[in-house]
């Protein structure tokens, strides 16, 4: 969930920021407003793309690992053995994974935001001659902190949802390999679907609150 997930999340966020900046530069340059590419990258990465890319990668990478790990233990009757010796499987297997996701999701989101802004600044520098120094200065001058906090506020919620879905599907694995494969697939699909739905709900809530 933590360090091992960082490279792929940072790489994807870098390219997402670069793509947003490139599209914004092409569109805004026709109106003579290319400098607003900075605001476009800042708002999109801080509010949405940083946390969303993090959540989707956690759902695809870590969630499947949770389901496969717990599911294989279920198949080999290790969970039944835990119950026999007096251990609560939820306390031993589920709670640590939930805590890991809830704690690491904001940290990974912060890394994704920084990588996305860096990607946007590189493209702005290459295509619009907006230097990194000017990019950072304008970002600080025009971006309000609420955009950052909106993105960060979603991260723990997404982490909680992802961990619960992955562990739940793992606990429902039957005694055969087909069940393990089906539950792992269902885990990833359900987690990504839930993340996008909850993100839409957050967007509507913040829109109503005018944040």
Image (cartoon, rainbow, N blue to C red):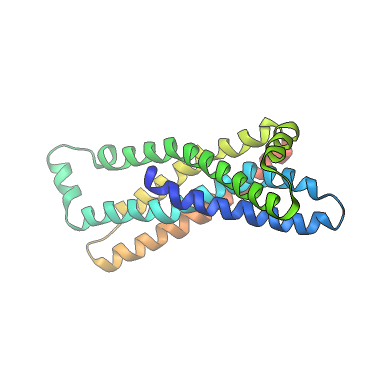
In this rendering, would 29 be left or right of 164?
right
Q: Position of residue 37 (x, y in %)?
A: 75, 48
> What x and y, as percent, mark residue 48?
62, 46
Point 43% across, 56% down: residue:
60
Q: Nearer the viewer, residue 163 or 126?
A: 126
Nearer to us in this view, 97 or 75: 97
Foreground residue, 84 or 58? 58
Say how many tags the image has. 0
- Which residue extends farthest right? 31
For this view, does 191 lie left or right of residue 133? left
Image-based side of 32 in relation to 171, left or right:
right
Q: Residue furthest left?
A: 85
Q: Is residue 169 visible?
A: yes
Image vertical order of residue 139 relative to residue 169, above or below: above
Determine the residue positioned at 48% across, 37% down.
Answer: 107
Percent from the top left, x then y, of residue 105? Answer: 47, 40
- Of 147 and 90, which appears nearest the observer? 147
Say left or right for 209 vs 201: right
Asked which quadrant contains residue 201, the reply is: top right
Q: Quadrant of the C terminus?
A: top right
Residue 1 seen in the figure = no
Q: Which residue is at 73% across, 46% downward?
A: 130
Residue sitting at x 27%, y 42%: 93
Vertical relation: 153 (above or below) 165: above
- Seen in the picture, residue 38 relative to 145 is either above or below; the reply is below
Residue 117 percent coordinates (x, y): 62, 44
In the rendered view of the protein, which quadrant contains the N terminus?
top left
């Amino acid at each position: 969930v933590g360090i091992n997930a960082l490279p792929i999340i940072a790489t994807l966020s870098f390219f997402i920021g670069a793509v947003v900046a490139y599209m914004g530069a092409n569109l805004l340059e026709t109106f003579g407003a290319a400098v607003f590419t900075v605001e476009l990258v800042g708002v999109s990465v801080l509010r949405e793309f940083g946390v969303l890319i993090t959540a989707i990668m956690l759902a695809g990478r870590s969630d499947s690992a949770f389901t496969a790990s717990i599911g294989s233990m279920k198949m080999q009757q290790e969970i039944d053995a835990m119950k026999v010796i007096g251990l609560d499987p939820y306390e031993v297997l589920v709670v640590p994974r939930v805590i890991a996701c809830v704690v690491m999701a904001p940290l990974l989101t912060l890394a994704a935001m920084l990588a996305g802004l860096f990607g946007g600044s590189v493209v702005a520098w290459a295509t619009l001659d907006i230097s990194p120094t000017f990019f950072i200065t304008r970002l600080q001058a025009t971006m309000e902190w609420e955009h950052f906090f909106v993105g960060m506020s979603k991260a723990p919620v997404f982490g909680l949802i992802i961990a619960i879905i992955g562990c739940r599907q793992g606990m429902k694995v039957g005694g055969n390999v087909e069940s393990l494969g089906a539950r792992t697939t269902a885990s990833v699909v359900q987690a990504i679907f839930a993340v996008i739905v909850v993100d839409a709900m957050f967007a509507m809530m913040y829109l109503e609150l005018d944040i």
